[in-house]
Amino acid sequence: MARQKVSGIGGVFFRAENPEALAKWYAHHLGVDEVPGDYDTPAWRPAGGTTVFAPFPADTDYFGDPGQRWMINFRVMDLDAMVAQLVAAGIEVQADGEVHPNGRFARLYDPEGNPVELWEPAGLSRETEEKT
């Protein structure tokens, strides 16, 4: 019998001070649909693509606040457009000016202070569109 492995992430679950308000913030600003209230309504279905699963050392400063135990990274097709949209909504976003071999990144924090990283994978967005 073939060795089994998971096929992807089925959900991201975390504690929040105000879960309803935070779910609405993610839906409104990042397009992550809220969890449906019934089994007939489909849940958020992200586009396929690379997902990185990476435990970090306990003393990393990559997430910002030393007490922060997790960070979510969302793939985006156009980082510049997403950053502009968030800034227009009054959300502070720090775009990394460096283009890394795996793409471009930006960082923001949700209303409860959780770090959110945006990632435009190399070769998937503007670069691909400009070549076609």
Image (cartoon, rainbow, N blue to C red):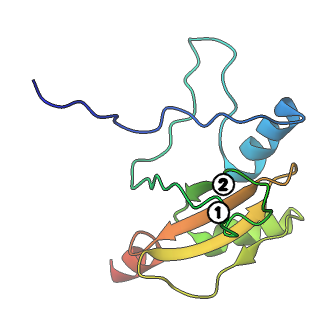
Q: Which residue is mark 1?
A: 117
Label 1 crowd bin: few (<14), some (14–19), many (20+), radius 10 Å: some
Q: Amino acid at mark 2?
A: Met
Q: Are marks 2 and 1 in contact (CB under 8 Å)?
A: yes
> How far is mark 2 from mark 1, CA to CA?
7 Å
The earlier-in-sequence mark between 2 and 1 is 2
x, y (%) of residue 71?
66, 54
Dividing the picture into quadrants, the one containing residue 121 is: bottom left
> Which secondary structure lies at badge 1?
strand
Q: What label sits on residue 37 in the rendered view?
A: none
Q: Nearer the viewer, mark 2 or mark 1?
A: 2
Q: What label sits on residue 71 in the rendered view?
A: 2
x, y (%) of residue 119?
55, 66
Instruction: Identify which residue is drawn at 50% across, 43% down.
Output: 46
| 49 lies left or right of 2 | right
> Going by the picture, which residue comes out furthest to the bottom?
98
Q: Quadrant of the C terminus?
A: bottom left
Instruction: Identify which residue is drawn at 85% across, 64% down.
Output: 91
Instruction: Identify which residue is drawn at 76% across, 52% down.
Output: 29
> Going by the picture, which residue comes out furthest to the left?
1
**Vertical position of residue 5 compared to residue 89: above or below:** above
Decide which of 112, 119 is in the foreground and name it: 112
> Which secondary structure lies at badge 2?
loop
Q: Quadrant of the N terminus?
A: top left
**Vertical position of residue 126 compared to residue 11: above or below:** below
| 86 lies left or right of 71 | right
Label 2 crowd bin: few (<14), some (14–19), many (20+), radius 10 Å: some
x, y (%) of residue 50?
39, 56
x, y (%) of residue 105?
59, 73
Instruction: Identify which residue is drawn at 87% across, 51% down.
Output: 111
Q: Amino acid at mark 1?
A: Glu
| 78 lies left or right of 128 | right
